[in-house]
Image (tube, helix red, strand yellow):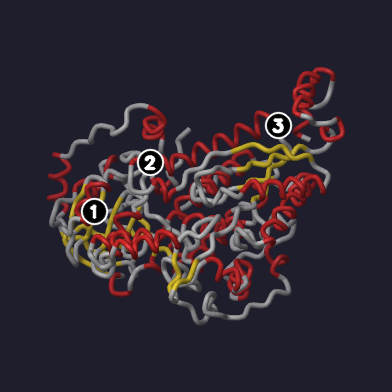
């Protein structure tokens, strides 16, 4: 065992003494030491209950003959960080989480790890660490938040953000806003739609690093506690069999994850995070391959913000395993990949039956014949940009309009709330990329304002920043190269015509090349917005969005 490096021999007496100071007995120290990486805190609603999950995990570890060793991990609530300077720390927190998880596991020579995430950057950060450290590991999340239905309308966090736009437009009053505010988020769990947190928890299950049910069992369901106990038991088996993330996360399982991503209509952020995870595994990813997968994978689910269903409805419809059963039946998945159950995906799905339903449609009767995400290329985005195609109104799949240019999210929000954006416009928000922001802020506030004002079927938005998984509309993010690196998005001027063609995977600035060349001669890189602290270091080291916005070694 790895932990023998801190337990065996006379020279390790000081180490054992320190462990005994915690209260561990010789009998406990003789067992595998299993890390329990718990991201509990008292500011993220998705994490407020994770101590219960951790206790169940530890019970499972003990039942299986291991000794649990719990420690913490940070997390940022993207909803609370949204729309102000705090959002600049959200994506960078992913790297801190990965680094801190690596540090704890390596410094203390743990034999295996159970990771307990739930929300946006915590899940991919822990997945990156698991792949980087590559010792037996398994995940169990805190589960999704419930969606409350009022007068036939399902409320979620996105409802509140859009209500802000609605009140600015005079469509609702303060009383209605207060009602939505008080009822949209009824309790613990990751926000209830197919937003980033739930997208990544579902995809962790698809990757094979979490037991069936991880993505969809409700945060308050006793089945979640049972799943946590089973997870604790399973990690000891993984240690005994030496099954590591490198055995599970392969090119084939990543392709499965992208396929499920397309079928589910996951957050556009999932592309960024899966790319980063692939990077940790040393597996290159050509973004054009994503479109190839999208072309052959129908969109079978339309969960919020793309539709009326929420993750609780997906669980009632059979969860991720039901979706995988239907995809596998049509040859869309590689069933030979190993999973954390110790069996292959095909073996996990054996004997399961899929019954088409309104939440998960059949392969032959999809919501759309192509997947939920699309990567767009063109002179605006030579190295790609991403849009959640399943959340775009049909009339906006193709669009051409004048550019309305803003050099920050804050400027754009002020213009939107000020009624300065008109039907047909293409809002451009730049210098918000990984380097330029720095931190690649999510743009839920401006997209929700546009939707709340009833402009989401006539106004597009393009940015080198990101979008929340809750975003809907023709919102094209991750434009690469970003403005701070001299990408063409930095050369766009007010009134330039931009043409978006999502079915053909293109986004084009309709300006002659010689004119762009003259503009480039005049362009000067702006001074860094942040010159001290973590964000300053992050801006110097971060790679492009097309590379997953990982930190360069």
**Left or right: 236 with respect to 271?**
right
Mark 2 or 3, which is nearer the eye? Answer: 2
Disc 3 packing (10 Å; few <14; some 14–19; many ≥20): many
* Residue on which the image places disc 2: 86
- Residue 107, compared with residue 486, is above or below; it is above
Considering every residue shown, the one lying at the far right of the view is 27
Q: Quadrant of residue 251?
A: bottom right
**Left or right: 501 with respect to 312?**
left
Considering every residue shown, the one lying at the far front of the view is 175
Q: Which sits earlier in the primary sequence, circle 2 or circle 1?
A: 2
* Residue on which the image places disc 1: 428
Label 2 and label 1: CA atoms lie apart by 21 Å
* Residue on which the image places disc 3: 109
Say if residue 296 shows up in the picture: no
Q: Residue at x 54, y 60 (%)?
A: 145
Residue 87 in picture, x, y percent from top left: 38, 44
């Amino acid at each position: 065992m790895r932990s023998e490096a801190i337990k065996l021999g006379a020279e390790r007496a000081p180490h054992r003494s320190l462990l005994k100071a915690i209260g561990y007995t010789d009998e406990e120290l003789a067992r595998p030491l299993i890390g329990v990486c718990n991201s509990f805190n008292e500011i993220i609603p998705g994490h407020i209950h994770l101590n219960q999950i951790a206790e169940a995990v530890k019970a499972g570890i003990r039942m299986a003959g291991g000794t649990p060793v719990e420690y913490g991990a940070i997390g940022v609530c993207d909803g609370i960080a949204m729309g102000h300077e705090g959002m600049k720390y959200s994506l960078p927190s992913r790297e801190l989480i990965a680094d801190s998880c690596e540090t704890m596991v390596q410094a203390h020579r743990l034999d295996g790890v159970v990771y307990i995430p739930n929300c946006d950057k915590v899940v991919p950060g822990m997945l990156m660490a698991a792949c980087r450290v590559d010792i037996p590991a398994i995940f169990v999340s805190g589960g999704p938040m419930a969606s409350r239905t009022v007068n036939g309308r399902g409320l979620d966090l996105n409802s509140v953000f859009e209500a802000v736009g609605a009140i600015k437009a005079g469509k609702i009053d303060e009383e209605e806003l207060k009602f939505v505010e008080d009822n949209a988020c009824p309790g613990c769990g990751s926000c209830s739609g197919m937003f980033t947190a739930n997208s990544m928890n579902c995809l962790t299950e698809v990757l094979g690093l979490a037991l069936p049910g991880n993505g969809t069992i409700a945060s308050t369901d006793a089945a979640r506690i049972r799943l946590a106990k089973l997870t604790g038991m399973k990690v000891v088996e993984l240690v005994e069999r030496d099954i590591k993330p490198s055995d599970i996360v392969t090119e084939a399982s990543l392709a499965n994850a992208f396929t499920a991503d397309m079928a589910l209509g996951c957050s556009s952020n999932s592309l960024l995070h899966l790319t980063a995870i692939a990077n940790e595994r040393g597996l290159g990813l050509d973004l054009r391959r994503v479109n190839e997968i999208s072309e052959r994978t129908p969109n079978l689910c339309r969960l919020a913000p793309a539709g009326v269903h929420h993750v609780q409805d997906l669980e009632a419809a059979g969860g991720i395993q039901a979706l995988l059963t239907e995809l596998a039946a049509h040859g869309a998945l590689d069933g030979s990949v190993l999973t954390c159950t110790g069996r292959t995906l095909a073996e996990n799905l054996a004997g399961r039956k899929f019954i088409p339903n309104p939440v998960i449609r059949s392969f032959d009767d999809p919501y759309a014949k192509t997947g939920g995400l699309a990567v767009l290329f063109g002179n605006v985005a030579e190295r790609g940009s991403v849009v959640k195609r399943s959340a775009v109104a049909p009339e906006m799949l193709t669009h051409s309009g004048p550019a309305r240019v803003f050099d920050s999210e804050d400027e754009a929000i002020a213009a939107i709330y000020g009624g300065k954006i008109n039907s047909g416009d293409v809002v451009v928000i730049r210098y918000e990329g990984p380097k330029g922001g720095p931190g690649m802020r999510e743009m839920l506030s401006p997209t929700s304002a546009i939707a709340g004002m009833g402009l989401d079927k006539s106004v597009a938005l393009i940015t080198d920043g990101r979008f929340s998984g809750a975003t809907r509309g023709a919102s094209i993010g991750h434009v690469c190269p970003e403005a701070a690196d001299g990408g063409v998005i930095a050369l766009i001027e007010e009134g330039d015509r931009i043409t978006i063609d999502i079915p053909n995977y293109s986004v084009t600035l309709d300006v002659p090349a010689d004119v762009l060349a003259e503009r480039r001669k005049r362009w000067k890189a702006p001074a860094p917005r942040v010159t001290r602290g973590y964000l300053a270091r992050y801006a110097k080291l971060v790679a492009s969005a097309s590379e997953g916005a990982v930190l360069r070694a």
